[in-house]
Image (spheres, rainbow, N blue to C red):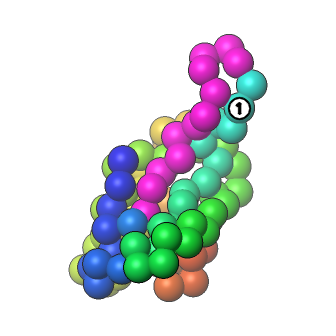
Amino acid sequence: EVAVSPDGQTAWVGIYGNGAVGRPGTDGDRLEADDLRTGTVTPVPLGEAVRPHDLKFGRNGLLYVTAEKAEAVLIVDARRRAVVG
């Protein structure tokens, strides 16, 4: 699941998890901000394992991400690369 920033410079990827069911691995504790010009990948920690889904940019430039395990919607400031709500 990917959302591209309104300026077309960054692809935001929800890292749902990297382990198979019942096997070790991360459990969806971050997003990745991939710079499409340089190929640089910046992890954006979500603070806990929430299994991010359905990334959407609002008109205000904020990124909204559903968090399955937290049963919530996270608000991410894409410029600061941080969860703000």
Q: Which residue is mark 1?
A: 25
27, 62: nearer the viewer: 27
Number of dots carrying numbers: 1
Please give the range of residues in magenta.
Answer: 12-23
Chief SS of the magenta region: loop
What residue lies at 31% left-to-right and 68% top-to-bottom? 4
- Asked if one can make out residue 51 in the rendered structure from this viewpoint, the answer is no
Q: Assess disc 1: are there few (<14), some (14-19) or many (≥20) residues with their C-alpha within 10 Å of its C-alpha.
A: few
Q: Is residue 65 left or right of residue 40?
A: left
Q: Is residue 56 left or right of residue 29?
A: left
Q: Is residue 19 above or below residue 42?
A: above
Q: Is residue 21 above or below residue 2?
A: above
Please identify the quadrant where the C terminus is shown: bottom right
What residue lies at 45% left-to-right and 56% top-to-bottom? 13
Residue that lies at the very extreme toward the right in this rendered image: 24
User: Please, what secondary structure does the residue beneath circle 1 have?
Assistant: loop
**Where is residue 35 drawn, in percent x and y?**
46, 74
2, 71: nearer the viewer: 2
Q: Per the image, is 18 magenta? A: yes
43, 39: nearer the viewer: 39
Q: Is residue 46 left or right of residue 61?
A: right
What residue lies at 57% left-to-right and 83% top-to-bottom? 80
Q: Is residue 69 above or below residue 45?
A: above
**Where is residue 14 drawn, in percent x and y?**
47, 51
Q: Is residue 79 left or right of residue 43?
A: left
